[in-house]
């Protein structure tokens, strides 16, 4: 799994846990819905850390909590 997919899956996981939609997350995080849509549909090739931090704020979690999963701990290097 690549990092983009891991980020996308984590956002969906957190939305499901909280029973919120991606549009509502956009509202909570104060980001345009298109920002989340671009992450979900791979239009955004590299979601920035500032955007991820804003999403974390919307989820009311820290960056540590976002990335502290087995998926992120076991990601392989993507350097070619």
Image (spheres, grey):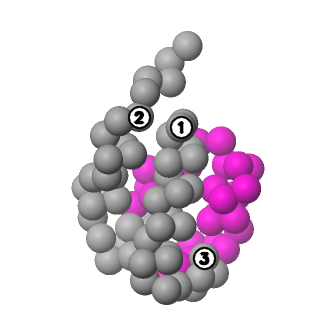
Rendered position, 65 above or below 68:
below
Residue 34 horizontal side relative to residue 58, left or right: right
Residue 35 falls in image quadrant: bottom right
Rendered position, 74 above or below 29:
above
Say whether residue 1 is visible.
yes
Q: Secondary structure at mark 1?
A: loop
On whether residue 17 falls in the magenta region, the answer is no
Give yes or no for contact between labels 1 and 2 (Cβ–Cβ under 8 Å): yes
Taking the view exactly as shown, the residue that stands out farthest to the top is 80
Start-end of magenta stretch? 25-53
Q: Earlier in the sequence, mark 1 or mark 3?
A: 1
- Between 79 and 9, the residue placed more toward the observer is 9
On whether residue 50 falls in the magenta region, the answer is yes
Give yes or no for contact between labels 1 and 3 (Cβ–Cβ under 8 Å): no
How would you classify the magenta stretch by its main secondary structure?
helix
Q: Secondary structure at mark 3?
A: helix
Q: Which mark is residue 1?
A: 1
Q: Earlier in the sequence, mark 3 or mark 2?
A: 3
| Residue 71 point in image, percent of width and height | 39, 46
């Amino acid at each position: 799994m690549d990092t983009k997919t891991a980020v996308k899956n984590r956002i969906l996981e957190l939305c499901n846990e909280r029973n919120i939609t991606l549009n509502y997350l956009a509202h909570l995080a104060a980001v345009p819905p298109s920002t989340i849509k671009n992450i979900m549909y791979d239009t955004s090739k590299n979601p920035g850390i500032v955007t991820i931090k804003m999403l974390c704020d919307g989820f009311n979690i820290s960056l540590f909590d976002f990335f502290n999963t087995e998926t992120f701990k076991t990601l392989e290097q993507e350097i070619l």
